């Protein structure tokens, strides 16, 4: 099984590749002990990250897999003699990243830390069939899968540890949980206190509750009064109710009259009923139903 290097960005562990052996004008090689490292020099002005990585891939031969949402991020800056790790971290500064690297296969995978979206949310930059040994074998894919599993377990451990540090606030998770619990208790106490002041209306909760109760009572009284005026038709509710009842009675009478005319087909209801019954018999005979 291949060995991977692990480094951390905020509380996020990022697995990064050292770039190897393919250079162009803006890609410089340096040697650090027994390990060679590719350093990239690029000057970018308002360039989408996807295009910048395509250029990087073309110059180095690296294959880069990133979240689809990353490719449209616009970046600017002078990147002088920086590693691929540093380039990615600077380009996506402020984001919780999970970066998997394999220098022997010249492969970099960049994802949002904790993102469980499937491969359909990823795009591939670079050709996976462009040289001997450049494609991933099933064993290597298995290694990456195991690495993802390890990341997931580490994230769960971090999330369940009250001493873990939240990268945005700098507070521990235990402190944030206590703060949230305190806020919930304060809100419940505020809501239960009739003298609490509503921040939008300015009145206290008791007055607002009484007002709402009065509005409900007024509506019920209006609805039950036949002399109340409907605001849309400007007719009395009693007259509207009587009209609705008469319409319902007329419809029931029309529906039961075989001589009544269907307004859509122009045919009598009795004829339509017989036609429907015949269709049912034909279907029953066709499908062997009784």
Image (spheres, grey):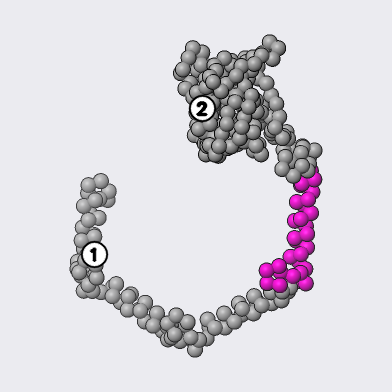
Q: Position of residue 157 (x, y in %)?
A: 73, 33
Identify the image quadrant of residue 186: bottom right
Tell me: residue 3, above or below residue 179. above
Q: Is residue 24 magenta?
A: no
Residue 45 location, quadrant: top right
Q: Quadrant of the N terminus?
A: top right
What residue does disc 1 label? 273
* Whole-number angstrom distance, CA of label 1 to CA of label 2: 74 Å
Give coordinates of residue 38: x percent, y percent: 61, 19
Kindly identify the residue that appears in the image at 61 percent across and 16 percent down: 29
Q: Residues within 10 Å of mark 1 (few under 14, many from 20)?
A: few
Magenta stretch encompasses residue 191: yes
Contact? badges 1 and 2 (CB < 8 Å): no
Q: Main secondary structure of the magenta part?
A: helix
Q: Is 251 located above or below residue 155 in the figure? A: below
Question: Could you tell me which residue is drawn at 64 percent across and 32 percent down?
Answer: 89
- Point 53% across, 19% down: residue: 24
Q: How many marks?
A: 2
Residue 245 figure quarter:
bottom left
Foreground of the two, 235 or 39 = 39
- Left/right placement of residue 248 relative to residue 72 reads left
Residue picked out by circle 2 = 55
Near-viewer residue (289 or 155): 155
Element under label 1?
Answer: helix
Q: Is residue 244 placed above or below 77 in the rendered structure?
A: below
* Residue 86 visible in the picture: yes
Mark 2 Cα shell of 10 Å, populated few (<14), some (14-19), many (≥20) = some
Q: Which residues are magenta?
A: 173-202
Give the number of the mark in front: 1 or 2. Answer: 2
Residue at 37% over, 77% down: 248
x, y percentage for residue 130? 46, 17
């Amino acid at each position: 099984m291949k060995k991977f290097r692990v480094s951390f960005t905020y509380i996020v562990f990022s697995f990064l590749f050292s770039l190897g052996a393919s250079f162009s004008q803006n890609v410089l090689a340096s040697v650090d002990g027994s390990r060679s490292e590719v350093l990239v020099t690029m000057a970018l002005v308002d360039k989408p990250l996807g295009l910048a990585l395509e250029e990087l891939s073309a110059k180095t031969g690296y294959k880069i897999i990133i979240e689809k949402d990353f490719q449209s991020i616009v970046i600017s800056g002078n990147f002088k003699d920086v590693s691929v790790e540093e380039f990615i971290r600077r380009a996506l500064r402020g984001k919780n990243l999970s970066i998997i690297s394999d220098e022997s296969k010249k492969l970099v995978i960049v994802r949002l830390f904790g993102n469980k979206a499937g491969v359909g949310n990823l795009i591939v930059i670079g050709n996976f069939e462009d040289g001997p040994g450049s494609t991933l074998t099933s064993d290597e894919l298995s290694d990456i899968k195991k690495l993802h599993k390890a990341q997931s377990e580490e994230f769960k451990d971090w999330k369940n540890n009250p001493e873990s540090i939240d990268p945005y606030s700098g507070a521990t998770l235990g402190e944030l949980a206590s703060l949230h619990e305190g806020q919930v208790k304060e809100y419940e106490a505020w809501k239960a206190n009739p003298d609490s002041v509503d921040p939008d209306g300015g009145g206290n909760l008791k007055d607002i509750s009484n007002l709402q109760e009065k509005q409900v009572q007024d509506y019920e009284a209006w609805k039950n009064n036949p002399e109340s005026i409907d605001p849309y038709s400007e007719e009395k509710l009693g007259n509207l109710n009587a009209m609705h009842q008469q319409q319902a009675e007329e419809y029931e009478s029309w529906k039961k009259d075989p001589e009544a005319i269907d307004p859509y087909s122009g045919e009598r209801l009795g004829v339509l009923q017989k036609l429907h019954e015949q269709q049912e018999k034909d279907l029953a005979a066709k499908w062997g139903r009784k």
